[in-house]
Amino acid sequence: MQGPTHDRITETAKALGLDLPEACRPGVQANLDLLAQHARTLDDFLAGDET
């Protein structure tokens, strides 16, 4: 079963008119995961900055 992120990748590629081969999807997913990790790190850093 495909997850919601896979469906979102498919929908976004279609909306942008991109022909995204199935073989590229794991790399796209890995990049999205990395971006989410960076966003969490930045959020944590900024949360510690509040006084």
Image (cartoon, helix red, strand yellow):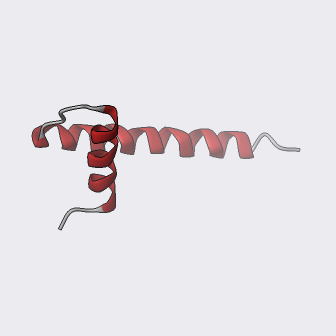
Q: Nearer the viewer, residue 5 or 44?
A: 5
Quadrant for the C terminus, please. Answer: top right
* Residue at (34% x, 42% y) in the render: 12
Residue 39: image x %, image y %? 54, 41
Residue 44: image x %, image y %? 64, 46
Answer with left or right where residue 36 lies relative to residue 15: right
Q: Nearer the viewer, residue 12 or 26?
A: 12
Rendered view: 2 above or below 25: below
* Quarter of the view holding residue 48: top right
Answer with left or right where residue 35 lies relative to residue 46: left
* Residue at (10% x, 40% y) in the render: 23
* Quarter of the view holding residue 41: top right
Rendered view: 8 above or below 21: below
Residue 38: image x %, image y %? 50, 38
Residue 43: image x %, image y %? 64, 44
* Residue at (33% x, 37% y) in the render: 31
Rendered view: 50 above or below 4: above
Q: Nearer the viewer, residue 28 or 47?
A: 28
Residue furthest to the bottom in view is: 1
Q: How many marks?
A: 0
Answer with left or right where residue 50 lies relative to residue 28: right
Quadrant for the N terminus, please. Answer: bottom left
